[in-house]
Image: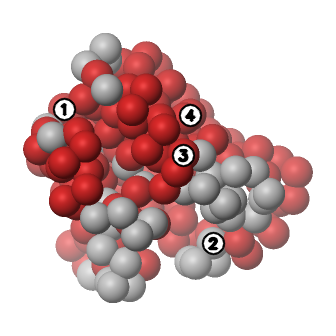
Amino acid sequence: MIRKAVAFAAKAHEGAVRKGSGIPYIYHPMEVALVVSMMTKDEAIIAAAYLHDVLEDTPVTAEEIRAAFGCRVLELVSQETEDKSRSWRERKGHTIEHVKTASREVKILTLADKVCNLRATARDYLATGDQVWERFNEKRKSMQQWYYRGLLESLSDLREEAPYQEMRRLYELVFAEPASEVCFREVAADRENN
């Protein structure tokens, strides 16, 4: 199943590159799958890691994923897929809220995806400073900080996992703010006020 997912994702993302770089996009799902495989040996979750952006960013349909990989993999991929018809704030807010009550397997997939995204951001941040935010749809650092802070809170039941601890350290590096429980209380207060 995993080899099939690698080939499927490579074909679906063929020609695409990561934001702000010439790096082939398929490297991102490969990295996400590697991180997932550090937390579980479940082949369906690892396959879903390779496929996690296929519905969101390619013409591949849910039915094609179901036919190739079955309902469980499709469900995992669907849980990680954002609705691009919504605004950035709506999509990210939905992700933060959804992950709070998601299954452990969905949380593993989400954590792997987000830590890989934050790794790339941190690498570029160290090289370019605040110019890094220009490559995002939401260019305000404060909004990116809100998003990652919310994710850390929503994924906190995975705090013993090495990728979660890495995400906390990357958050502190990029946003120069301790990823503490105080931050999480601030996020909750921000949500109540909005």
Mark 2: give few (<14), some (14-19) or many (20+) Cα within 10 Å.
few
- Sequence-wise, which precedes: disc 1 or disc 2? 1
How far apart are the alpha carbons under marks 2 and 4?
A: 20 Å
Label 2 amino acid? Phe
Q: Residue furthest right?
A: 127
- Residue 71: tell me if it is visible: yes
**Residue drawn at x 32%, y 39% as measured from the top left:** 48
In contact (CB < 8 Å): disc 1 and disc 2: no
**Residue drawn at x 76%, y 44% as measured from the top left:** 123
Label 1, on which residue? 104
- Sequence-wise, which precedes: disc 3 or disc 1? 3
Label 3, on which residue? 10
Q: Please, what secondary structure does the residue beneath circle 2 have?
A: loop
The quarter of the displayed image where residue 106 is located: top left
Label 4, on which residue? 31
Task: Look at discs 3 and 1 and give the one toward the viewer.
Answer: 3
Task: Look at discs 3 and 4 and give the one toward the viewer.
Answer: 3
How far apart are the alpha carbons under marks 2 and 3?
A: 23 Å
Label 1 amino acid? Arg
- Sequence-wise, which precedes: disc 2 or disc 4? 4
- Sequence-wise, which precedes: disc 1 or disc 4? 4
How far apart are the alpha carbons under marks 1 and 4?
A: 19 Å
Image: 188 above or below 77? below
Question: Which image quarter is the N terminus in?
Answer: top left
- Residue 121: tell me if it is visible: no
- What number of labels is visible? 4
Task: Look at discs 2 and 3 and give the one toward the viewer.
Answer: 3
Q: 85 and 160: which one is in front? A: 85
